[in-house]
Image (cartoon, rainbow, N blue to C red):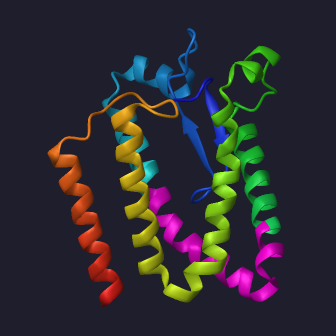
Amino acid sequence: MTQGGVIPRLGSGATACLLDRGRHGNPGAAGALQQAKGGVAVKIVLYLFAVGSGLMNAVQSGCNSTLGKSIGQFPAAVVIGLIATGSAVAFGLVAGGLAWPAADKVAGAPWWAWVGGVLGATFIMAQLFVAGEVGSGVFIAMTVTASVTMSLVLDHYGLVGFEVHPAGWGRIAGALFMFAGLGLIARY
């Protein structure tokens, strides 16, 4: 989990705003809504937000790949980064969650928390170089299958701020079905 309330996130998929429960007595935007409304409606909205982001991710891959072919991959990466940053700033201003963090919050973040932007940039570069060559279906199937597999490892061991969720047989079987789906999508 992240610290704070409304935090802009750049990188994977459409620019999104992560609403979390926060820590240290600050419930964050989603935490406050969950406390106020019992939580079910908020979870539904957050799930729909995640699904919408996934749908946009497939479209984004095509947009970014086409932009890369039009103006070059590295210039496209810079343009995409600038647009993502501008979008996050605008969304943060509208949502009222954009503020410069206190020095103790910055110093309190673990070293690996600062790597997310580089990982997001790597994903954008993969979109630019790979998606147009292999097609949207294969590209998204590869990235989602890889994401699910890595997510199981992160959850199982409680890495990078996630709570421990053991990777039981059901979760492992789900990941194996993802690989089977990837194989079918790649073959046909």
Number of marks in the image?
Answer: 0
Q: Which x, y percent locates residue 43?
A: 36, 36
Image point 44% across, 31% down: which residue? 162
Find residue 138 and report its horizontal and vertical position in percent.
42, 79
57 inside magenta stretch: yes
Rendered residue at 76%/20% (across/down): 107
- Coordinates of residue 91 in the picture (x, y in percent): 70, 45
Nearer-the-camera pick, 66 or 74: 74
Compared to 75, does 103 lie above or below?
Answer: above
Which quadrant of the figure has residue 140?
A: bottom left
Q: Residue at x 67, y 43 (%)?
A: 115
Image location (x, y in percent) of residue 14:
60, 59
Relative to 118, say whether 142 is above or below: below
In the picture, measured across the screen, residue 95 lies left or right of residue 55, that is right
Left or right position of 105 against 21: right
Q: Quadrant of residue 76?
A: bottom right
The residue nearer to you, when weighing 46 against 162, is 162
Please tell me which residue lies in front, 52 or 131: 131
Q: Main secondary structure of the magenta part?
A: helix
The magenta span reads 52-77
| Residue 84, picture quadrant | bottom right
127 within the magenta span: no
Q: Quick check: 130 left or right of 111? A: left
In this view, which residue lies farthest toward the top? 25
- For image coordinates 68% across by 25% down, the residue present is 109
Q: Is residue 131 above or below residue 178?
A: below
Q: Compared to 141, does 12 lie above or below? A: above
